[in-house]
Amino acid sequence: MNLVERDRKVLWHPYTQEKTAPPPIPITRGEGVWLFAEDGRKFLDGISSWWVNIHGHSHPFLNAALAKQANELEHTMFAGFTHKPAVELAEKLVAILPKGLTRVFYSDNGSTAVEVALKMAYQFWLNCGSERRTFVAFENAYHGDTFGAMAASDESSFTKPFQNLLFKVLRAQSPDNCERKKTKAVEEILEKNHREIAAVIIEPMLQGAGGMIIWEAEFLKKIRELCNNFNVLLIADEVLTGFGRTGKMFACEHADISPDIICLSKALTAGYLPLGATVATEEIYQAFLSDDRRKTFFHGHSYTANPLACAVGAASLELFKRENCLEKVAFINQKFNRFAAKISELNCVGEARTIGGVSAIELVSENSGYLADIGQQLYQEFLARDILLRPLGNILYFMPPYIISESEIDWVLGEIEDVIKTLSTKKHIKNIPNTSRPRPY
């Protein structure tokens, strides 16, 4: 029995309709930007394995850090104990985060980082003697798949079955393509409801799963000002945007603002191990210090501050500095901007947009959104060309590890152009002839 047959007997894959999905591809190893399959094929990882891998697969420096830590301490509970990797990673994070974020609370992933932030914001006001039960979130938002994160997310295929179980939020209008500084709706919500609002939660500069929607820095700056004016906390969900994805170390830097709470995960360990971090200001932390134990923040996970994850996270930040990753992202962005200008001329392209190391192409199709048929068709077409791109419905995006070479970028962009040009003349992706260019290997 081969690996796929064994998989089919015991596993249940995420975001997958198991009845109709093609068999999963068995991957045996990774190196650089490449994933190697059991049958000998290799795929360029064009989405950084769900946005987590920034330094490439199986990086020797990270491998060494992980192995060293495994020989010393693999895990210990974090209530009443501490260890060097957790302290070192927290110190490194506080040193590079926007000013004022000083207290690191570890969890397991992006969703839990958001859950922690929501609970932290609610209890902050409770500890201060004011119950504020309401949160403000945005259209097209996606914050994760646990219940609090789903509540903050906009209604979608991900959240619809659970809608009756979610707490209500005040949903603010997002800036659209024509009017990117639309903060009036947020201002009206805050003016009317600020005494009951615990926090505004926002994905700074880039909404990811909601459609790779890019915002102007002025919008973010204005949201910070409004939160200050109405004495409401600001939560920045930088699970996707942190660690260079938007061209800055953190997306909040585009607007030169500091949130009250920031949520981190994904690239935090460069794709090696699950780890989330929710970082708050000293003011928020101080509100939980009391002789009354009921004011304790009663939240935790079995694998909170796992030493292996913390060690590789600290090594990733060191590698980020050593390899001048922000310069690499700037170079990728130059290539993406030139490509966007060229591809925008095709009649099946609604909009091509870029920010940092992210290129997104919104395709004109019969239906749009995450369930648009064209997404699965494009996914299979690019796999046939040895490229892993996983469109969000009619939104095709390219988000590679930062170590990608110029020839590899050019090859993938050439393949994207070839597919989209053919889309301009053919109705269905399945009719596209494979005229792919020679691989860069």
Image (spheres, rainbow, N blue to C red):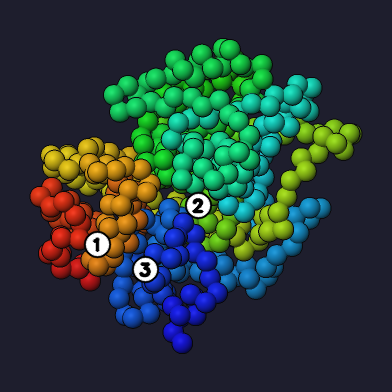
The tag on residue 381 is: 1
Would you say 416 lies left or right of 84 here? Answer: left
Mark 3 residue element:
loop
Which residue is nearer to you in this view: 116 or 80? Answer: 116
Mark 3 vs 1, N-terminal side: 3
The kind of residue tagged 1 is: Glu
Residue in view at x 45 percent, y 31 percent: 139
Within 10 angstroms of label 1, few (less than 14), some, or many (20 or more) residues?
Answer: many
**Residue pointed to by mark 2:** 266
Marks 3 and 1: which is nearer the front?
3
Q: Quadrant of the C terminus?
A: bottom left
The kind of residue tagged 3 is: Pro
Quarter where residue 40 is shown: bottom left
- Residue 332 spot, x, y in % from top left: 28, 48
- Residue 177 spot, x, y in % from top left: 30, 28
| Disc 3 from disc 1: Cα separation | 13 Å
Would you say 291 lies left or right of 134 here? Answer: right
